[in-house]
Amino acid sequence: MSRVLLKEVTKTFRRGVVAVDRVNLEINDREFFVILGPSGCGKTTLLRIIAGLEEPDGGEIYIGERRVNDLEPKERDIAMVFQNYALYPHMTVYENMAFALQLRKLPKDEIRRRVEEAAAILGIKELLGRKPAELSGGQRQRVAVGRAIVRQPQVFLFDEPLSNLDAKLRVGMRAELARLHQRLQTTVIYVTHDQVEAMTLGQRIGVMNAGRMVQVADPLTLYNRPMNRFVAGFIGSPPMNLFTGVIQTSPLRFVTASFTIELPAGIAGSAKPEQAVVLGIRPEDVVLDQSGPVSAVVDVNEQLGNEALIYLKLEGESVIVRTSPHDAPGPGTRVRLSFDPAKIHLFDANSGSRLN
């Protein structure tokens, strides 16, 4: 049983900086759980608290059935993969992977079996005699993952492990990590600021902001039903279009300085007349429509092969449209837009909480 449970976990650094603010979280046995958030949100600090590398100021941490607050990292039965790989440069790949097992005084035959098995899983058997300086970035990352695998821990902790790789290698390593989890069936906690990594790897994602866990859900729920304005703006590439305006009734509509659109009945939820709200609409839900209520001028046309991203300017506003590359108007063209009414999100302008 390798469930991880956090109860009211808090960490404050000097000068009153709250890095982790009363986080409650349950990560299921064998789950691939991603902690996602911008730089400085507290996600790495939270991971280090789970690992025992940081001591919390309050709260409880459980791994399996054990409360581990007072246990040293080596006693928690976890393995951590760092952003910078942390390989010993004077050791071969085999020696790097075997080192932790040697410290535990395992028999040599058992160490060799585990190292060779992990190397076979990761496709690095032919690299066992090399040193880290002779490896590419992707190969070093595999060695770092292999060093964690051989320990056969209850929980794997990954701290932005792909951030030093180029774009093509990141895509390949994402797929490898997903396959590795399916094969090992071990609990994984993975920290990243890259939402593409989070959406493609995570069975569930916890989104952090300013030390707090603001929403925990599966990737599609986060994308389609963000709980607040922060999650709406953070999840999605390109990000959700957000417009600040007011709700008016009779008829129900959303009004900004740049445009007015009518809203379907019931969509306003708990919003009151003349309340300041933020309307969110994803780029794929904005339609180039000659009879649409929104007028804008094309600023940039990004051709991506299978699609085009159109960046448009309104008066004091901007909007991104995802469309077919064959339908994309050029810069300087004035177009009209409509929003898919079923895909509109409304948030309170002050609290940021979801209204509909």
Image (cartoon, rainbow, N blue to C red):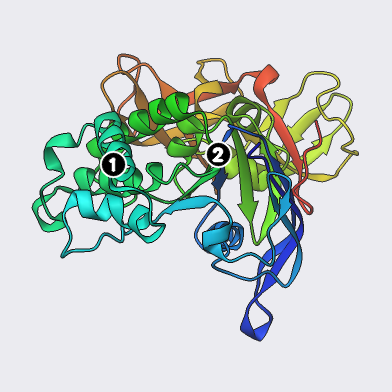
Residue under label 2: 235
Question: For this view, does 159 lie left or right of residue 258?
Answer: left
Whether 74 is drawn above or below 144: the answer is below
Q: Nearer the viewer, residue 158 or 98?
A: 98
In this rendering, the label closer to the viewer, 2 or 1: 1
Mark earlier in primary sequence (2, 1): 1
In the picture, the quarter occupied by the C terminus is top right
Name which residue lies at 52% across and 55% down.
38
Whether 262 is drawn above or below 170: the answer is above
Label 2, secondary structure: give it: loop
Residue under label 1: 109
Name which residue lies at 56% across and 29% down.
282
In the picture, the quarter occupied by the N terminus is top right
Alpha-carbon neighbours of circle 2 within 10 Å: few (<14), some, or many (≥20)? many
Alpha-carbon neighbours of circle 1 within 10 Å: few (<14), some, or many (≥20)? few
Label 2, label 1: how far apart the Cα atoms are: 47 Å
The picture places residue 227, in percent across and down from the top left corner, at 73, 39
The picture places residue 220, in percent across and down from the top left corner, at 60, 25
Please tell me in which quadrant of the rendered image residue 258 appears.
top right
Question: For this view, does 127 lie left or right of residue 46?
Answer: left
The picture places residue 335, in percent across and down from the top left corner, at 45, 25
Q: Is residue 257 visible to us here?
A: no
Whether 342 is drawn above or below 118: the answer is above
